[in-house]
Amino acid sequence: MAAASGSNDETERDDVDPPHPADKIYADGPATSEIEAVSAEQAAEIEADGGPAQPGGEDEASGAAADGDAPADADTPAPAEAAQPDEVIREPDDVGPDTADGEGGEARRVGPEGETRPMTDAADRPSPKAALVYNPIKVDADELRASVERLSAEAGWAEPLFYETTVDDLGDDVTRQALEEGVDAVLVAGGDGTVRAVSEAMSGSGVPLTIVPSGTGNLLARNLRLPLDDGEAVIRATFDGERIAMDVGWASLRRPDGEVAEHAFVVMGGMGLDAAMIANTNPQLKKTVGWVAYVDGAARSLASAKPFRVMYQLDGSRLHSARVQSVLFANCGSLPAGLELIPEASVADGALDIVIFQPKGPLGWIFVWRRVAWDNSFLRKFRAGRRVLALRTKDNAVRYSRGTGIEIATSDATPVQLDGDEFGEAVHVRTRVDAGALLITVPNGHDTTGL
């Protein structure tokens, strides 16, 4: 009867609306009228039995007790069947996690084919990446980039990032961009100004910095005693070298108009004649002959050099007033040509070394030169020489102090320099040291005693 009804229903539907090709998929299924008839029949049976059974009722409980192993409804398997094959009925909590042989229940990194790969840390970071910041005027950019790319690949690091400095950006802005990219190391190649700017941006970041010797002075590289003629060894240290924490100096400069700006220095800064000497150095001559060009700047400056009055005070010390030619605040002590301005200076002692030049007349400059070029740079290297220095009468042409910072004030605007770059004029300078703020990479086995 149901079949006949379905046949008539389909015939009528075909007359009204021809079947869609997709209907062939359901050609063997029941017609709508058949489904409705079965539903009506089931509803009638339930009504005749007195309505649907309530869960947990007496009938259900007694039925389950009477039948023993019989299920409560047709969809529930019998206990005997559920206990197969080992006669144990399992609850959901009894089923262990679905893991491969030899694997635990923890997350793991896998490759395209499902093979296990090592996880570097909990965040599953990708391969580490380095960034190179370089001054294209100071280095052979193509050769340098090729070396960094090759050594990065050999170390298993990702392709490095490259940033060029410009006249408007000495390297601090692009270094911050590299840090925002999450790089694991930064390399810098350029002059002392480029190293200073990059170090300023990296101070306190915890990311190691590699200094690739290049440019004019390489003063920080010299003070760290890095190999100046083996750039590849220094680059390779980025990936497998040792790290040392060095101090960073900061100088807050107040301009004559009241504007205040703070900048970092990693070698030394100064106020007075040394800054005027740098300002008077011919830029083209500096590019041609390097640091020797500062001799020209010194000759230009000494001819018109005049002492100026300063008020200065080291942290925790009393206030002083003096007429000086220059005040230096240094993190390092070595100068080019093997000159030792501050033999005891250390990049990791948490202090700045202060040098005050106050020669009296032309003869006083002879004492300055003797102190720097002869006493510090030669006699101090030998035991007999140190005995001579101990017996010599001290002069005040060069005075040394040490502390965590110095405050300097002048009545007239005076030139300021930081790491060999002129920074205009200031009437007040406040310095401080940030101990161990910069991580420096050095080759394995590098001698760090005395740094």
Image (cartoon, grey):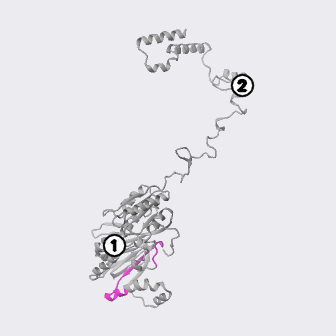
Placement of 208 over or under 380, stated as above or below: above
In this rendering, position of residue 358 left or right of residue 8: left
Q: Quadrant of residue 424?
A: bottom left
Placement of 324 over or under 224, stated as above or below: below
What is the C-alpha distance between the residues marked 1 and 2?
96 Å
Q: Is residue 81 magenta?
A: no
Tell me, yes or no, whether the two marked residues, 1 and 2, touch with CB atoms within 8 Å.
no
In this orientation, does residue 437 appear? no
Give coordinates of residue 86: x percent, y percent: 72, 33
Amino acid type assigned to the residue bearing label 1 in the image: Gln
Look at 39% across and 86% down and name the residue there.
Answer: 370
The magenta-colored residue range is: 344-367
In this orientation, does residue 63 appear? yes
In this rendering, position of residue 8 left or right of residue 41: left
Q: Which residue is mark 2?
A: 69
How many marks the image carries: the answer is 2
Q: Determine the secondary structure under disc 2.
A: loop
Look at 44% across and 57% down and name the residue there.
Answer: 183
